[in-house]
Image (tube, rainbow, N blue to C red):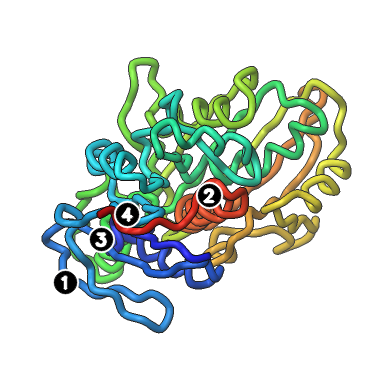
Amino acid sequence: MAFKVAIVGATGNVGREMLNILEERGFPVSEVVALASRRSAGTEVSFGDRTLKVKALENYDFSDTDICLMSAGGAVSKDWSPKIGKQGCVVIDNSSSWRYDQDVPLVVPEVNPDAIELFSRKNIIANPNCSTAQLVVALKPLHDHARIKRVVVSTYQSVSGAGKEGMDELFTQTRAVFVADPVEAKKFTKRIAFNVIPHIDVFMEDGYTKEEWKVLAETKKMLDPKIKVTCTAVRVPVFIGHSESVNIEFENPITADEARDILREAPGCLVVDKRENGGYITPLESAGEDATYISRIREDATVENGLNMWVVSDNLRKGAALNAVQIAELLVARGLIQPRKKAA
């Protein structure tokens, strides 16, 4: 049984990663179609050892397509995802447009796989924010064991989270610093090269940014609405890989050793936690990997039943493309979709 899959936004960082991961994981495809805006039509992208010519989204008929992996931004998704869903194609969307819709499941397969059953309400499934995805993968097994009351997270997010423009700006600014050229900030609000910026997405009335609110709202929707979450989101001069410093307060006792053992057995988690120089994971090691890495697990003596840990993952993979493909795999594994034939 093989499925026809369309990638919308195939020329972007995440779109290209989706193509790579579909091929790497041997997803059962009968055909893969690369889609983007009209101006990108004709561009070539790779799928395994094949080269695909990008087609224009505006002209594409989804009536015989089974799954659409959508990674073209919020405005495109808001407009197109309902239209695609009405044609019988299941949309797995990487933008924030549908994450908070009560009729759209927000899914991380290692965390809340049963939520996927609700997809038929709109034929849309939402992918979480990149920083939330890795966080809940690490929190879920601990929550099941000791019940989480409160989470304080500080994120250290790579520039690839802001797309190709973000990566280009870090490269250009870094080169400018070394050759003493003027440093221009276009994509980010301040210089990102050799700097950190405590500001991702727009500011809200309460002083938090939208990125910080996403972590709160999405963790509650996927894990438990009773958990209290607060976040500070920071952009750092790293090309790929988001890192998070996470402080957790539990209802029930849990030791660092117990947490380490639980996380070693948890799906999607990889514990690298040696109390020695280099005995932890940094974003550099996470790039190109599928796991959510967890290091620096230790007890917090300032609160009852508290733990600290360091969580790192490739934001283009688990934070976006990999999670989308895993959702597609879950649809297939549960028999929730069947290959279609083109409408007459």
Percent position of residue 319, x then y: 50, 50
Pick whichever, 303 or 193, lies toward us. Answer: 303
Residue tagged 3: 35
Q: Is residue 241 visible from the viewing direction of this image? A: no
Mark 4 or 1 closer to N-term?
1
Q: What residue lies at 34% left-to-right and 56% top-to-bottom?
A: 65
Q: How far apart are marks 4 and 3 (CA)?
A: 17 Å
Report crowding for label 3: few under 14, some 14 to 19, many 20 or more residues within 10 A (C-alpha).
many
Residue tagged 4: 163
Q: What residue lies at 30% left-to-right and 69% top-to-bottom?
A: 178
- Callout in the foreground (4, 3): 3
- Callout in the foreground (4, 1): 1
Q: What residue lies at 47% left-to-right and 45% top-to-bottom?
A: 130
Mark 1 or 2 closer to N-term?
1
Is the Cβ of the residue at disc 4 closer than 8 Å to that at disc 3? no
Percent position of residue 268, x then y: 67, 53
